Amino acid sequence: MNVVDTGADGAQGDGGVPAGVDQRAVAAGGGVVVQVGGNATVTVEQTVRRVLPRQLPAAPGVFAGRVAELVALDRAAGVGAPDGVAASGAVMISAIGGAGGVGKTWLALTWAHRNLHRFPDGQLFVDLHGFSPTGRPISPAEALRGLLDALGVAPDHVPSGPDAQAALYRGLIAGRRMLVVLDNAATAEQVVPLLPGSPTCTVLVTGRTTLASLIDRYGALCLPKMSSVQVRRRGGTR
Ligand SMILES: Nc1ncnc2c1ncn2[C@@H]1O[C@H](COP(=O)(O)OP(=O)(O)OP(=O)(O)O)[C@@H](O)[C@H]1O
Ligand SMILES: [Mg+2]
């Protein structure tokens, strides 16, 4: 039986898991058991297909500038560090902020596609609809259900409680070289339950607001607020 520790989040009390909770994922053959301890212990057992999620939208075609931002993202992601894992042992989180339409998503997708080889265990992408003219921001619970689906968890095997869902999610990606793109976040509270606990994962968050608590609590790299780039096209600029 393999025991996969889900990382430090069980002790942090973040991501919907109360402080002091004993949280670990135990993988045995095709089955996964996630145990969320504390006063109310929840145990979820299920069979999970081992899938390789590739959820990134297509890479932007024309992409101009953003050299400094791409270098900063490289650094934050430990590019050049041994194994590409941050020396701190913490999950690597980069936050890309700026006004609507400035190019946050394009930057995230461009960096992600240029670095696909660093994430052989898959890429997860969630549009959190933080600033969507047509709808409300999606809840962490909705996002988690989508992530579990992408990771091969059948709907009838998704545990009911948010703590157990978050624990299962973190357990499934623990130790895997994965990229998690959380696009268009409204608040840090929306993002925190979706953060992996494993330093083998890299997270890119985009949003129009400064997600200050991600920096304070998780040491996220916050790129300087972006302004729009000038893109030269035949016949003029935009
Ligand atoms: N570096 C770039 N080079 C060329 N075009 C770009 C670049 N960045 C953005 N664009 C153009 O600007 C448009 C808007 O970019 P993007 O969708 O990334 O904005 P955003 O900051 O994510 O906006 P929102 O806050 O609404 O999500 C893109 O569809 C693309 O046409
Ligand atoms: Mg965007």
Image: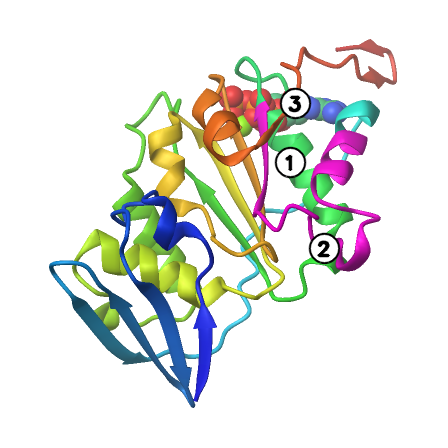
Percent from the top left, x then y, of residue 211? 47, 23
The answer to whether mark 3 and mark 1 are in CB contact below 8 A is no
Q: Quadrant of ligand 1?
A: top right
Residue 51, horizontal then vertical, whole percent: 50, 73
Viewer-side residue, 23 vs 158? 23
Q: Nearer the viewer, mark 3 or mark 2?
A: 3
Q: What is the crowding at mark 2: few (fewer than 14 residues within 10 Å), some, or many (at least 20)?
A: some
Total numbered badges shown on the rendered structure: 3
53 vs 72, nearest the viewer? 72
Viewport quadrant of the N terminus: bottom left
The residue at 33%/60% (across/down) is: 167
Secondary structure of the residue carrying numbered label 3: loop
Say what secondary structure mark 2 lies in.
helix
Estimate the x, y position of residue 17 in percent, counting from the top left.
28, 50
Pointer 3 and pointer 2: residues touching (CB < 8 Å)? Answer: no
Q: Secondary structure at mark 1?
A: helix
- Mark 3 lies on residue: 223
Q: Nearer the viewer, mark 3 or mark 1?
A: 3
* N-terminal-most mark, 3 or 2: 2
Task: Tell me the distance, in whole angstroms, between the alpha carbons under discs 3 and 2.
Answer: 21 Å
Which segment is the magenta one?
70-96
Quarter of the figure with the C terminus = top right
Q: Which of marks 1 and 2 precedes in the sequence?
A: 1
On the image, numbered disc 2 is attached to which residue? 116
Distance, label 3 to label 1, CA atoms, is: 12 Å
Residue 198 visible within the image: yes
